[in-house]
């Protein structure tokens, strides 16, 4: 019997083209990653960005009235906020639409907003923020607040949310939102006595 010939199939001629295309794509992605890394390195080397810092330096209470008829509390106070821009080549523009809230044990006491302003290089700005509000305040919270007042340890939370735009020279970056939480302990919140800040801790995060 004669030998059967084994059929031979032509090799896929597109394999070389696919490999070349894949190699080109990988090289292009590596180039993009290297370019981004180089840009970031240049930015940090030239501009040396530093995070701005915020602190509450002073507080004053002008009104603190509890209504027994409807169990509401009317509060009017002013907080002096210190904002520092430590950067030598980056300016900060604080926009409209900010919001500040002061609360006691999760219950809002008063609210306000920061003024829109421009902060230059290596600048420290202190602003007085007036806040007021009337909110429901149950008898249990009133008793807890009175006990805190007697002990001279009144924990307050200040929440600040403000739209911010960074500027690198004449280049404006996209607007971001900065959120700051300040946990204060005061020795008093009575209008009859100037409150002293016994302790303060700060946390901040950014929304892109």
Image (spheres, rainbow, N blue to C red):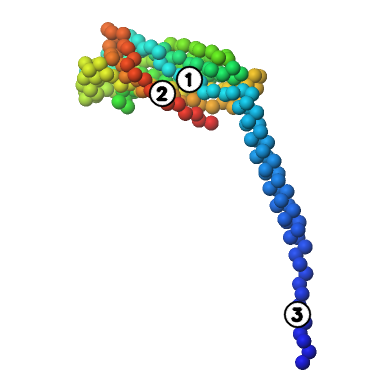
Q: Is residue 18 above or below residue 170?
A: below
Q: Quadrant of residue 181?
A: top left
Distance between the Cα atoms at labels 2 and 3?
79 Å
Q: Could you tell whether 92 is left or right of 110 in the image? A: right
Q: Which residue is mark 3?
A: 6
Q: Residues within 10 Å of mark 3 (few under 14, many from 20)?
A: few
Q: Which residue is mark 2?
A: 202
Q: Residue at x 76, y 72 (%)?
A: 9
Q: Which residue is mark 1?
A: 53
Quick one: 78 or 17, which is closer to the camera?
17
Q: Is residue 197 above or below residue 4?
A: above
Residue 146 percent coordinates (x, y): 22, 18
In terms of secondary structure, where does tag 3 sit? loop
Residue 35 percent coordinates (x, y): 68, 36
Q: Could you tell whether 150 is left or right of 49 in the image? A: left
Residue 97 in view, yes or no: no
Q: Residue at x 38, y 11 (%)?
A: 58
Q: Are marks 1 and 2 in contact (CB under 8 Å)?
A: yes
Furthest residue toward bottom: 1
Residue 116's disc is none
Give the mark nearest the N terminus, 2 or 3: 3
Give the mark nearest the N terminus, 1 or 2: 1
Q: Could you tell whether 150 is left or right of 30 in the image? A: left
Give the mark nearest the N terminus, 1 or 3: 3
Q: Could you tell whether 24 is left or right of 76 in the image? A: right
Q: Residue at x 75, y 65 (%)?
A: 12
Could you tell me which quadrant the N terminus lies in? bottom right
Distance between the Cα atoms at labels 1 and 3?
79 Å
Quick one: 35 or 129, which is closer to the camera?
35
């Amino acid at each position: 019997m004669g030998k059967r010939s084994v059929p031979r199939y032509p090799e896929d001629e597109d394999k070389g083209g696919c490999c070349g295309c894949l190699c080109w794509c990988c090289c292009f992605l590596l180039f993009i990653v290297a370019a981004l890394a180089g840009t970031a390195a240049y930015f940090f080397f030239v501009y040396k960005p530093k995070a701005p810092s915020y602190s509450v330096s002073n507080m004053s209470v002008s009104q603190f009235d509890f209504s027994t008829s409807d169990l509401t509390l009317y509060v009017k106070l002013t907080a002096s906020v210190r904002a520092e821009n430590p950067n030598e080549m980056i300016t900060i523009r604080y926009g409209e639409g900010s919001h500040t809230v002061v609360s006691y044990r999760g219950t809002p006491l008063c609210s306000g907003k920061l003024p829109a302003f421009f902060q230059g290089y290596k600048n420290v700005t202190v602003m007085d923020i007036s806040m007021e509000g009337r909110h429901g305040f149950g008898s249990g919270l009133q008793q807890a607040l009175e006990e805190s007042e007697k002990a001279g340890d009144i924990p307050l939370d200040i929440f600040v949310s403000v739209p911010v735009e960074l500027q690198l020279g004449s280049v404006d970056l996209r607007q971001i939102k900065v959120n700051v939480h300040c946990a204060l302990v005061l020795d008093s919140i009575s209008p009859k006595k100037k409150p002293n800040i016994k302790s303060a801790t700060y946390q901040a995060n950014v929304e892109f």
